[in-house]
Image: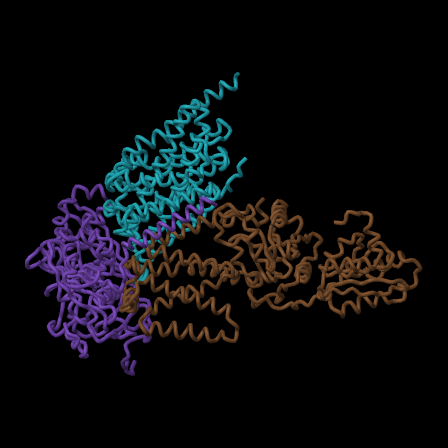
Chain colours: A purple, B brown, C cyan
């Protein structure tokens, strides 16, 4: 019992001592500000120019409504490293910067062309930056501009961009998974090149910085998703548009839900007779083998879904009707993937599909000697695509609603 | 003690001397009735405390018997005395006393003393008839489904409530007297053959060795029964209940019940951690619902311990642990609040404690005022004025409600005490402090032993009969 | 005759003891197929059980310290007891350091380490004061928490589709040899070999017969759980990425993201490691207390706080930075402490006991 009392007294002294000397790690929320977005550019005077999007929490709260100010404030700081820029943020603002809620990191195109590995480390090492923060490449505009767009929903730009990217990827698949974690993964794994999401701005940015911009029905400037930015090593070498990105992602089994619009008999996307099919559970499998010095890839895509629109008379009461639909889809997807593959081979020359990665994983011993020259081997490879799609149901109508005509 | 040992019987045979003796013992107390009566043809004396019985009882049970014709017919005094004991008061507890000194304690206990002039013996008849509360529904442990009887202040009633549930010869009651001022009757009840005799011995020993002056509620001996030595007594190790069914349920699980005269709360020892989360109702329902609500109680217990501390830790130390959207909305509410989160929580917690204390102590009629002042002025207005944030009010009220989920009130009140400790720890070093606090509590819980029974042990269930 | 600890409590205590720090610090990151290491290390580790049990049963289940005295004589035996006590205290100190390193890299930044250590050490001492029974009961609580957290982690990772089976490939890209090598160099001694501390409490735990069974099951379960967590780390992080992690399980937990609401489960890891380290250190501390009290003839309880403070001080002073800490742990501790004290001394003791015992039997 005496011992207990001793412990109690000791504990009491300790806690008093701690209270007296202060709570070292304490960061009060009303004395801190959340950084939600980072934009990285080349600096004018120093190595990097970092733009911070800082949330003005009161303005984002729909209940309190705030005072009609902007939901975010943008600060720009230069530094020879990103960490330096962050720690110099308080030159401009008064609160403790919380980095833990960064949602989007936009990398400027110019910086990306020089290589991103030089600054990735600080992002990966910092424990406050989440592994699933989006790393995007700003195409066609300085990176900081992306954080300057005000959006009608009252939320800050990076929140909008993040949900937009995730939703788009989930529903359509036209943008690669580009989390911070994926960057490390792609750079580290052999036989795979890095692809990051690309975003671009359309509209007039100058007007968009002010809150007046959201008082119009049509957004003055808006951030759009623009497919993938393709890297070689850690340097940006080119872009893929949304359609091709989708095919690449489909081939590497990242897309499970998407919609294909198959052109009519005319062959052009605009010609009549188009069919749209929505697929839900798509999967792809790849096989890689070496034919002498040339790799040969096999890709099989499968999925099931439903018909969403049809502009030609396919009878969906018969099995044949479905078979026709499936055949059409298969052909279309095979063609598109093939086309994308050839485009990538010719224009980019890097293995964005991850065939090499597959070879590395499943045939490590065979891949080992080829690892260095894989990208050049990739450009000579040929791809064989097969697909089997199942259309399950026609939704509400058995066929296109049109007059059959009375007759024999 | 009178030095003249032979004289006692003779003293009893002289009514005058008895009267004098009582006079000297009881002094001028007004509730002592010393009535001269005639039993048959003999002169007799009836003594009792009017405060321990009712005139109705004396009239119907005693005087009527004394006046009945059989009493008068036998010839000798001794025979009459014998007959009184054997025939007339056979239905009441009675005792033949031969020592004058033994009479006052009997009278104090509510016995009536009948003496016959010339007979060296006294007949002590239990004439106790006290006005006690009738059996009502318990106030502290309510059930929706289940027996509505509750213990009363009368130990006799309480024992009968228990006995009524055990039609079993193995049920034992043992009587102890505690308190040298009050001589309060304390009974222990157990099922012979079920309980560990060692534990019964320990309880007996503890009750016998108690040195207390007075005992008005079982809460007093709860302290006494706490096991000493193994750490501080931060958790209750004595279960108390107002419900006979709950107590009986425990008695079937090797427990000993302790009934204190004058207290409607019957104690149960040894009690372990899980007992305090069991409500008797759990067993009267479909077992799924029963166990669901039991686990809900554990959950609420954990909530009421940790939520405010967790809130502080997370908002002022580890902002990265909250989802961004939630953090934004918390931040929006905290905007412009003058205090740090920890001070804010402490303020509100203390306010709540004051409210609770006022609510339980204050007369029921004024009770409504408290809720108005509490809810409107302190809750609504404080938020409106920007002194505290909405989220703090939510956190505090959530913990407050969770704190009351524990079926046993004493348990809930101890939890409240730890909550403050947790708040202090987490406002000093965040989650680390909170976890250390939790560790301390868990260590404490596992260290306690109640009568040699581990207080919290997940794998060795002491009261499960299957384990040898 | 001290009362025996419940069988299941003994098992859980050993299990938590083995798992606690090994879950995070145990997986060797230098080999690609680290999850195999645990499985391979399991078999030679079982030989250790055989050795320890043989030692115990040779002299009526007396516990490590009395056995040492019996085997080596009073003076040398006492020296060995002191060596073992110091050894246990040192491992406790290392574990505290491990935990503090983790806490400083997940939860806190500025709070001075001595403060954290002091607080932690007090809790350890308080835990050890309760004796082996209370520690065992505490362990059963901890076990549920740890298992629950691990299961939550696995389920959440699964739901956030971070577990990709392909990532464990290429399998055995560097061959089997490095794996076996690490198993022998590292995993046998930590965590499995550390079970030697339970020899100290043997009379209360039930002697050789019980230990053989219980410890074996504890080893099997540990092996399964450790390999599973290792596998989870590999499957979420990938073989390539895991190499770069200081705390691989932590990095895996950081990948959890379910609908942007359930994110950042770092804290779970902190909880696991804090609870586990607490228990482990309490056991080591208690063993050291028993040892010291045997030499200086006082009650073990008298040493709790002083030894705990000593362990805390050790943990801070022993190395300057985490690299030094890790190299010390991977190289010097294994060769100069683990192998001699976990294998050689018990082996010699066993031989001595056998010889003496036989002598005693013939005379």
Tell me the quarter of the picture where residue C335 sits: top left
Tell me the quarter of the picture where residue B337 sits: bottom left
Q: Give the camera-side residue of C109 and C153.
A: C109
Q: Residue furthest left?
A: A45
Picture coordinates of residue C91, whole percent (x, y) = 34, 37
Picture coordinates of residue B294, whole percent (x, y) = 50, 60
Q: Is residue B275 left or right of residue C286?
A: right
Residue drawn at the location 17% of the way across and 46% of the way down = A291
Residue C280 position (above or below residue B292)? above
Residue B9 visible at all: yes
Q: Is residue B355 left or right of residue C264?
A: right
Residue A354 visible at all: no
Picture coordinates of residue C126, whole percent (x, y) = 42, 45
Q: Residue furthest bottom?
A: A406
Q: Is residue B95 left or right of residue A237?
A: right
Residue A78 position (above or below residue B196)? below
Q: Give the camera-side residue of C88 and B63.
A: B63
Q: Give the camera-side residue of C81 and B338.
A: B338
């Amino acid at each position: 019992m005496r011992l207990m009392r001793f412990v109690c007294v000791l504990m009491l002294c300790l806690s008093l001592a701690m209270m007296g000397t202060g709570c070292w790690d304490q960061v009060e929320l009303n004395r801190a500000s959340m950084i939600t977005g980072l934009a990285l550019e080349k600096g004018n005077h120093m190595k990097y120019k970092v733009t911070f999007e800082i949330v003005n929490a009161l303005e984002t709260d729909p209940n309190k409504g705030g005072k009609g100010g902007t939901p975010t404030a943008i600060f720009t700081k230069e530094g020879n490293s990103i960490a330096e820029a962050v720690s110099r943020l308080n030159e401009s603002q008064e609160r403790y910067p919380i980095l833990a809620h960064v949602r989007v990191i936009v990398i400027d195109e110019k910086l990306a062309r020089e290589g991103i590995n030089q600054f990735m480390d600080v992002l990966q090492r910092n424990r406050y930056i989440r592994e699933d923060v989006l790393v995007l490449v700003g195409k066609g505009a300085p990176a900081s501009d992306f954080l300057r767009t005000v959006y009608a929903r009252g939320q800050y730009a990076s929140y909008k961009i993040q949900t937009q990217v995730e939703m788009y990827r989930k529903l359509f698949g036209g943008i690669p998974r580009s989390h911070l974690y994926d960057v490390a993964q792609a750079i580290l794994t052999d036989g795979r090149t890095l692809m990051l999401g690309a975003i671009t701005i359309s509209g007039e940015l100058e007007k968009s910085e002010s809150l007046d911009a959201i008082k119009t029905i049509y957004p003055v400037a808006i951030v759009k998703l623009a497919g993938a930015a393709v890297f070689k090593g850690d340097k940006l070498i080119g872009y893929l548009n949304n359609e091709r990105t989708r095919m690449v992602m489909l081939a590497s089994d990242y897309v499970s839900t998407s919609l294909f619009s198959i052109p009519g008999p005319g062959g052009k996307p605009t010609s009549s007779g188009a069919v749209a099919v929505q697929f839900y559970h798509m999967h792809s499998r790849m096989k890689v083998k070496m034919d002498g010095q040339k790799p040969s890839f096999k890709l099989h895509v499968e999925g099931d879904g439903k018909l969403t629109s049809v502009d030609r008379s396919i009878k969906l009461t018969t099995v044949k009707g479905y078979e026709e639909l499936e055949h059409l889809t298969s052909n279309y997807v095979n063609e598109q993937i093939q086309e994308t593959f050839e485009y990538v081979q010719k224009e980019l020359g890097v293995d964005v599909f991850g065939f090499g990665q597959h070879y590395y994983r499943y045939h490590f011993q065979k891949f080992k000697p080829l690892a260095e020259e894989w990208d050049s081997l990739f450009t000579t490879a040929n791809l064989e695509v097969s697909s089997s799609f199942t259309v399950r149901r026609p939704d509400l109508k058995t066929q296109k609603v049109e007059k059959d005509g009375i007759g024999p | 003690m009178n030095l003249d040992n032979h004289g006692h019987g003779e003293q009893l045979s002289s009514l005058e001397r008895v009267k004098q003796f009582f006079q000297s013992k009881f002094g001028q107390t007004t509730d002592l009735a010393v009535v001269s009566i005639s039993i048959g043809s003999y002169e007799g004396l009836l003594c009792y405390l009017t405060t321990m019985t009712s005139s109705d009882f004396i009239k119907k049970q005693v005087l009527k018997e004394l006046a009945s014709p059989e009493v008068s017919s036998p010839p000798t005094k001794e025979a009459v005395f014998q007959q009184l004991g054997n025939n007339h008061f056979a239905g009441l507890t009675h005792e033949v006393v031969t020592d004058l000194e033994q009479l006052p304690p009997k009278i104090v206990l509510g016995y009536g003393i009948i003496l016959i002039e010339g007979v060296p013996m006294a007949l002590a008849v239990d004439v106790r008839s006290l006005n006690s509360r009738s059996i009502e529904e318990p106030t502290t442990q309510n059930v929706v489904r289940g027996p509505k009887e509750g213990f009363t202040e009368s130990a006799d009633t309480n024992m009968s409530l228990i006995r009524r549930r055990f039609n079993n010869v193995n049920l034992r009651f043992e009587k102890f007297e505690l308190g040298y001022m009050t001589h309060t009757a304390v009974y222990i009840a157990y099922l012979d053959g079920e309980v560990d005799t060692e534990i019964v011995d320990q309880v007996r020993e503890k009750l016998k060795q108690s040195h207390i002056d007075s005992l008005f509620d079982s809460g007093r001996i709860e302290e006494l029964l706490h096991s000493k030595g193994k750490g501080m007594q931060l958790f209750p190790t004595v279960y108390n209940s107002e419900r006979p069914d709950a107590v009986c349920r425990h008695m079937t699980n090797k427990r000993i019940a302790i009934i204190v005269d004058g207290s409607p709360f019957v104690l149960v020892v040894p009690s372990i951690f899980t007992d305090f989360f069991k409500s008797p109702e759990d067993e009267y329902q479909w077992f799924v619902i029963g166990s669901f609500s039991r686990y809900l109680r554990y959950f609420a217990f954990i909530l009421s311990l940790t939520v405010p501390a967790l809130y502080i830790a997370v908002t002022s130390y580890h902002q990265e642990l909250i989802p961004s959207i939630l953090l934004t909305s918390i931040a929006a509410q905290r905007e412009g609040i003058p205090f740090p989160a920890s001070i804010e929580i402490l303020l509100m917690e203390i306010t709540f404690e004051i409210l609770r204390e006022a609510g339980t102590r204050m007369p029921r009629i004024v009770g409504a005022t408290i809720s108005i002042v509490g809810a409107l002025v302190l809750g609504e207005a404080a938020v409106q004025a920007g002194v505290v944030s909405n989220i703090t009010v939510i956190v505090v009220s959530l913990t407050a409600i969770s704190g009351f989920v524990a079926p046993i009130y004493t348990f809930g009140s101890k939890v409240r005490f730890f909550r403050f400790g947790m708040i202090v720890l987490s406002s000093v070093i965040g989650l680390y402090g909170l976890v250390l606090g939790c560790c301390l509590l868990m260590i404490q819980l596992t260290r306690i032993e109640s009568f040699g029974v581990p207080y919290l042990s997940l794998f060795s269930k002491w009261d499960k009969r299957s384990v040898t | 005759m001290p009362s025996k600890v419940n069988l299941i409590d003994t098992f859980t205590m050993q299990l938590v003891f083995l798992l606690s720090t090994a879950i995070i610090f145990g997986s060797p990151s230098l080999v690609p197929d680290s999850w195999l290491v645990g499985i391979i290390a399991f078999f030679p580790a079982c030989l250790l059980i055989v050795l320890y049990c043989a030692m115990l049963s040779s002299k009526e289940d007396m516990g490590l310290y009395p056995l040492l005295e019996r085997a080596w004589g009073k003076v040398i035996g006492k020296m060995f007891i002191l060596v073992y006590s110091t050894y246990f205290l040192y491992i406790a100190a290392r574990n505290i350091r491990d935990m503090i390193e983790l806490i400083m890299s997940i939860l806190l930044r500025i709070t001075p380490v001595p403060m954290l250590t002091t607080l932690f050490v007090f809790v350890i001492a308080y835990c050890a004061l309760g004796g082996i029974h209370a520690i065992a009961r505490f362990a059963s609580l901890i076990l549920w928490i740890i298992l629950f957290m691990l299961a939550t982690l696995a389920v959440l990772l699964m739901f956030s589709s971070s577990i990709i089976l392909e990532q464990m490939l290429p399998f055995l890209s560097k061959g089997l040899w490095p794996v076996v090598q690490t198993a022998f160099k590292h995993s046998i001694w930590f965590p499995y070999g550390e079970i030697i501390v339970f020899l100290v409490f043997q009379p209360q735990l039930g002697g050789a017969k019980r230990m053989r069974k219980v410890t074996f099951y504890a080893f099997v379960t540990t092996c399964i759980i450790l390999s599973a967590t290792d596998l989870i780390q590999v499957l979420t992080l990938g073989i390539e990425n895991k190499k770069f992690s200081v705390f691989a399980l932590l990095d895996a937990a950081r990948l959890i993201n379910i609908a942007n609401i359930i994110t950042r489960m770092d804290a779970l890891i902190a909880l696991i490691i804090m609870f586990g380290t607490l228990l482990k250190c309490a056991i080591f501390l208690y063993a050291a207390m028993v040892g010291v009290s045997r030499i200086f003839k006082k009650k073990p309880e008298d040493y709790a706080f002083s030894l705990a403070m000593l362990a805390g001080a050790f943990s801070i002073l022993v190395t300057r930075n985490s690299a030094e800490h890790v190299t010390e742990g991977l190289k010097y501790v294994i060769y100069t402490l683990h192998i001699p004290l976990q294998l050689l001394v018990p082996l010699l003791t066993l031989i001595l006991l056998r010889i003496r015992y036989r002598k005693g039997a013939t005379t």
